[in-house]
Image (cartoon, coloured by chain):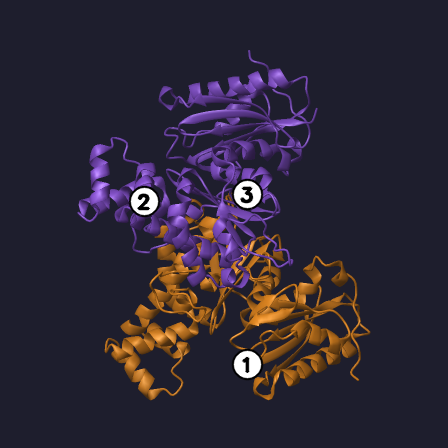
Chain colours: A orange, B purple
Amino acid sequence: MPDYSIGVDLGGTNLRIAAVDQEGELLEKITLGTRIALGRDLVLKDMCDAIQQLVAKYREVGPLTGIGIGVPGIIDMASGMVLESPNLPGWTDYPVRAEIEKRLGTQVILENDANSAALGENWLGAAKAVEDMAILTLGTGVGGGLVLGRRIWHGMTGMAGEFGHMTVEPEGPRCGCGNHGCLEALASATAIVRMAREAIANGAAPGLSLAASSNPEFNSKAIYNLAIQGDEGAKKIFRRVGRALGIVLSNLINGLNLPMYVVGGGVSSAWDAFAPSLFEELRQRCMVYAATSPEPANKQGASAHVTPTGKTRTLVTRALLGSDAGLFGAARLPQVSIDQNFASAVSVRSPS
Amino acid sequence: MPDYSIGVDLGGTNLRIAAVDQEGELLEKITLGTRIALGRDLVLKDMCDAIQQLVAKYREVGPLTGIGIGVPGIIDMASGMVLESPNLPGWTDYPVRAEIEKRLGTQVILENDANSAALGENWLGAAKAVEDMAILTLGTGVGGGLVLGRRIWHGMTGMAGEFGHMTVEPEGPRCGCGNHGCLEALASATAIVRMAREAIANGAAPGLSLAASSNPEFNSKAIYNLAIQGDEGAKKIFRRVGRALGIVLSNLINGLNLPMYVVGGGVSSAWDAFAPSLFEELRQRCMVYAATSPEPANKQGASAHVTPTGKTRTLVTRALLGSDAGLFGAARLPQVSIDQNFASAVSVRSPS
């Protein structure tokens, strides 16, 4: 039996805990609701109970490499504190890592959820073939992660990869971070709904207006459904999403010259609606893409970053692991950690 | 006597060749005009003659680690071809590295000039204290270089670091690369003169207008001189330069979370004129800067990236080595090359 590790994806809605072996095979996954309203102590208890349950069950089958936990927020890597997390109200400036370690009696690795997703796609998903890659995760917000040499690039304080807060339109819509015209303010699920409501308010989008009044759940998915049905107002919004993504990806390609850029998160399901304008921006704006583009294969999300003739190519493609990317990436964390404390097997305190 | 290496800075105006020891001490520097008009063969002969002259002179004093050559253009690292170089017309798609190696009878390292400047500032200049840093070089164009772990980050094909072609204003002025609103179209010496001429044509800048008609050399330096004398038209241009730099630096800080960002190149002499609006943008736009800013020390270009209390800080500062950054960086190239071929001493063919 090979070594295994525990990955946790602590989301605003779901709390998922998995045991994954070192080949990436799922041994078991526990899915719970994240009971945020009942307080962080209870959420941490749910998490630690599930971890201990899995550890007890797989104790006999092989050594535990470690425990990785993906959290939706900015994490100070040195202190293990959550510095900012819109989806986990009340968790800011709280010693999350220390609290979990106290409960489990062992070290854990805390990581930003988009960084975990990057690692997951690099390990088992769309970016398996490359050493270096970046991810944009389009959800309620827009996250980002950078993997160099199959390790997460953390930067000085663990805040690297905040591609969602790159400026696309200097005078654009206000972002939650305080800036104007961030990618997140133009390409998140929240931004899509906001742009739809603005179009409705301007009286410029009868299809959206009808849908908003008849559909109690008027969300980005509903707007995408309108777009693929041909509604011009909805299509226009996804063109703006694609343009914003194309500008940020142009900047990343010119700046980093990586072989692969992955677009993930729930909104990436709307790929068909935003991808054409995304690639149009890349072709028009990005000199490094022009020199290394695999057109037209890239439009279909080709999986090889080297052509049969051996030429290196820049690929921009959809994520493959869906909502599991962050969970598998979290399980991968202990395996790639440079910290020798995590390199050998760890033991977890039994439930008291 | 320590090992030494040869660095070459092949500029559009000057061709400089230096012997530098492994501690960064200059042994000797030869400065020639780049006789571009007489053809690339003559320029290469001038360069190789000077290299051979230095090698013959310092043969007795220690082993030669290698030869590094900084070139103003995009270089395909695999083939050693210059793919694009506005300042070296006629050098494109020409096997520069192979031709130099044939003449010298040994391997050389070809590198983009901004990458060389990054390495030089990291070795001996403003970024000596850090492992990871980025540079923006403001000259005729805007170059960029990224150093991670004291090595140049090349990316997949050697094109990484093209920060001058990050988009600042999606509908902004046309850039030479084909894009609109690149940093280069808003913060290069060329852009500064273009913006001044536009202001003059709009009749909105009497000071600039007077200077342009009386000064046969109406260049970015002349416009800077007007700005520090208080001319509102000139000041406005440098505010736009600072804003563009601030937006690109915000993107780099949010994306990479490096400890140090250096602004170099000839236009960085105008620091006083553009720095206030640069830092204003950082404060307003950049969440990672807000979390790690060393204000107000940073405004003076503080040199320590860790405060006395040990807290990590993001520093944005001026380059220290001036026009020698690229030359020293080129000499550093053989020392940090991962290619084992360059790790031992090399011998150069004598002039025939």
Q: Position of residue B95 (x, y in %)?
A: 47, 29
Q: Circle 1 is placed at which residue position?
A: A13
Q: Residues within 10 Å of mark 2 (few under 14, many from 20)?
A: many
Q: Quadrant of residue B56?
A: top right
Q: Could you tell me which chain the residue with mark 3 belongs to?
A: B
Q: Amino acid at mark 2?
A: Ala
* Real-space CA distance between mark 3 and mark 1, rounded to the nearest whole angstrom: 46 Å
Q: Amino acid at mark 3?
A: Ala
Q: Circle 2 is placed at which residue position?
A: B227
Q: Position of residue B231 (x, y in %)?
A: 27, 46
Question: Element type at marker 2?
Answer: helix
Q: Quadrant of the N terminus of chain A?
A: bottom right
Give the side of residue A6 with respect to residue B259, left or right: right
Q: Residue at x 68, y 20 (%)?
A: B61
Q: Nearer the viewer, mark 2 or mark 1?
A: 2
Q: Position of residue B346 (x, y in %)?
A: 65, 25
* Closest to the observer, B284 or A76: B284
The answer to whether residue A188 shows anywhere in this view is yes
